[in-house]
Amino acid sequence: MKHIGTICGTAIAGMFVMSVWGAFSDAYGIAGGWFAGLAIIGIMWFLNHFLGVHNNDGAWIDMALGIGVCGTMRDVFRHGVDAGISSLPTLGVVIVGAIVGGLTAYKIEVYLAEKKEKEESAA
């Protein structure tokens, strides 16, 4: 049931982001975009994380994955498979960025652990 809640929660977040955020931004400019971001992400984060939708038994995935999949599939459903194919270069860059970010985070954790170990052995 937890996984179904995670899927539904991130899908709802994606639908709100893809349908409401742009409308607020178009109508009210930058302030509307900031308000939509605060309202949508704030409320959906509260619902998805604080009220108990967690995905702790696998790779940690935040709402961003659901929002990204929702946005991609929305365009595929609206404009056809060509929209999905044209998004593949962007998806490739995102994957490379995720790998670089993960490796960087790992290296920083190793560095901090070694630094802490040296400090404890010196003391």
Image: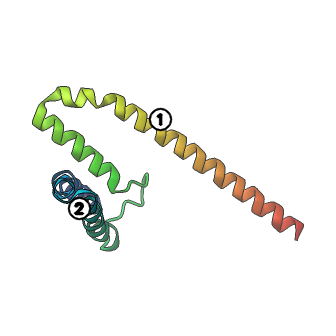
Is 72 left or right of 50, judged from the image as shown?
left
Q: Is residue 78 visible?
A: yes
Q: What residue type is labelled 1?
A: Val
**What secondary structure is marked by label 2?**
helix
Distance between the alpha carbons at the discs numbered 2 and 1 = 32 Å
Q: Residue 47's spot in the image, x, y percent?
A: 27, 70
| Image-quadrant location for residue 76 | top left
Residue shown at 34%/68% (left/top)? 49
- Neighbours of disc 2 within 10 Å: few (<14), some (14-19), many (20+): some
Residue shown at 86%/65% (left/top)? 121
Q: Are marks 2 and 1 in contact (CB under 8 Å)?
A: no
**What secondary structure is marked by label 1?**
helix
- Neighbours of disc 1 within 10 Å: few (<14), some (14-19), many (20+): few
Q: Mark 1 or mark 2, which is nearer the start of the sequence?
A: 2
Look at the image and tell me in which quarter the C terminus lies.
bottom right
Is 115 left or right of 65, judged from the image as shown?
right
Which residue in the rendered view is the most extreme toward the bottom?
Answer: 51
Q: Residue 52's spot in the image, x, y percent?
A: 32, 71
Look at the image and tell me in which quarter the N terminus lies.
bottom left
Which residue in the rendered view is the most extreme toward the left?
Answer: 78
Task: Determine which of the numbered discs, if any, sits on residue 96 in the image.
Answer: 1
Q: Is residue 116 above or below residue 66?
A: below
Q: What residue type is labelled 2?
A: Gly
Residue shown at 61%/49% (left/top)? 106
Q: Residue 64's spot in the image, x, y percent?
A: 34, 52
What's the colour scheme?
rainbow
> What residue would you read off at disc 2?
32
